[in-house]
Amino acid sequence: MRASSPRTHHKNPEADMTKTTTPFSAPLSRRSVLVGLGLAAGSAVFGLPRGAAALEGTLVVSNWGGDWNERTIKFVEAPLVESQGIKIVRDLGMEPERKAKLIAEKRLRRGTIDVIHINEGDSVELNGQDVLADIDFAKVPNYADVVPALKSKPFFVPWLYSGVTLIYNKDKVPNPPKSYAELWDKKWAGKLGLTNQLYFNYVMMAGLIKGGNVTNTEEGKKRLIELKELTQPRIYAAHQQLAAGLANGEVDIAINYKARGLQWANDGAPLAIQYPAEGAIAVMFGAALPKRAPSPELAYVYFNAMLDPKAMAGLAGASFYAPANAKAALSPELKAKIDFTAAEAAALKFPDYEHVAKNTAEWLEWWNKNIAR
C-alpha cells in the first residue's frame, strides 16, 4: 500500500505507502485481496542454497537513514546480501534529495545508484521521469509469494506497508478523536503533532474528510489552513522528533503511520492507536531499479533478499509494518497487532499516486509556505 519512515529514519519510509483509481486497475482490487488473504504464515526461505557460489561486486543502495536503515542492514543486507560477498555502499538521506539525484543522473550514460528505497508514490513519480527500469520479476523468486493485491506496478518491489492513523497518549486523552475530521476542533489546540515528512498524506487526509476523497486536495489545502488556525499544531522535522514530542508531553496526539505508533509504544510511551472512521490512508514502501544502475544483476539479488520470508518476519517484528510476503512467518499475536481487521482493510484509502506525482512538488512548496513555518 502505499506511504515514511518512524522509530525514525529520514522518511518512512516511513513517506510512507496505493490508490483508488488508475494505478490499480486489476481484476481484483487491492482492498478485496487484502481482506481475503490477510498475511498468511508459511515456511521461510533461509538464504542461499547449500553450495551456492559467493558473488562479487559493489552495490550502491540509496535509502533513508536512522532506524530504517539499521533494520535494513540487520535483517536484509548483512545476512542475505553482504554474506554472499557483495559489498554494499550506502547512500543515505531524505527522499527529496535522493530522488533529485536520481533524476539528475538520467543525463549520464551510467548512473551511481543500483537500488533506491522509496514509497510507492515516489516510484510513480520517478517512473514518470523515465528514470526507473521495469523489473524482471522472474529474477526475483520471492516475488511469487507477495500478496497479489500489492503487485500493482512493474517498476516497484513492494516490501512493507501500514496506514495513517491517529496516535494518542492514552494517559492524557481518555476520549480520543475517532476520525480525522474530529481533529478540526479548538479543544486540541497545542496538543496535535505533525511531521513535515507526511505533508502529502496530510493534504490527502484533509481532502478526505466531510465526504471527500484523497484526490480532493485543493479543498484539503484549505482545510489544513483551518486546522492550523484552530489547533496551532506543532510541526516536527521528522518522525524521531515527533516521537520525542509525544514522549515528553509536548503533544498528546499525532497523525502518523500505525507502525510508527506501535514502535513508539513498544519503546515504552503510553500510546494507543485509533483507526480513523474515514478509513486510514494506506502507505507502502519498497524499492526500484534505476535505468542506469551500474550493477543491475546484483540489484536482483538484493530485491530477492528484501522479500525473504525470514527477513520479512524479522522486519515486521522490529518495525511493526506489515510484510508484503504472505509467507512471512508471523506469530498470531504479532499479526493481530500490526495487521488491519477485515473491516479496517476494506476501509483503507489508497492514494491515486498519479495524482500525487503530478502535484507533490507544488504541495511541498505550499506546505512549507503555509503550514510548516
Image: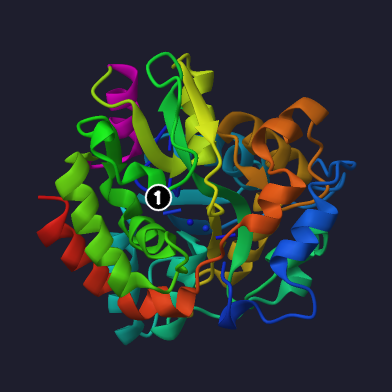
Which is more toward the observer, 182 or 241? 182
Residue with the mark numbered 1: 181
Image quadrant containing the N terminus: bottom right
Position in image of residue 36 (x %, y %) = 84, 56
Position in image of residue 205 (x %, y %) = 40, 58
Q: Viewed as shown, does residue 87 lie left or right of 323?
A: left
Which range of residues does the magenta coloring cover?
236-248
Q: Can residue 77 be seen in this view?
A: yes
Magenta residues: mostly which secondary structure? helix
Which is more toward the observer, 106 or 8? 8
Please state which amino acid type lies under the numbered disc 1. Ala
Identify whether 355 is placed above or below 139: below
Identify whether 18 is placed above or below 66: below
Q: Residue at x 39, y 73 (%)?
A: 216
Task: Based on the picture, tell me whether residue 245 belongs to the magenta stretch.
Answer: yes
- Place residue 6 in its image quadrant: top left
Which is more toward the observer, 254 or 11? 254
Label 1 sits on a secondary structure element that is helix
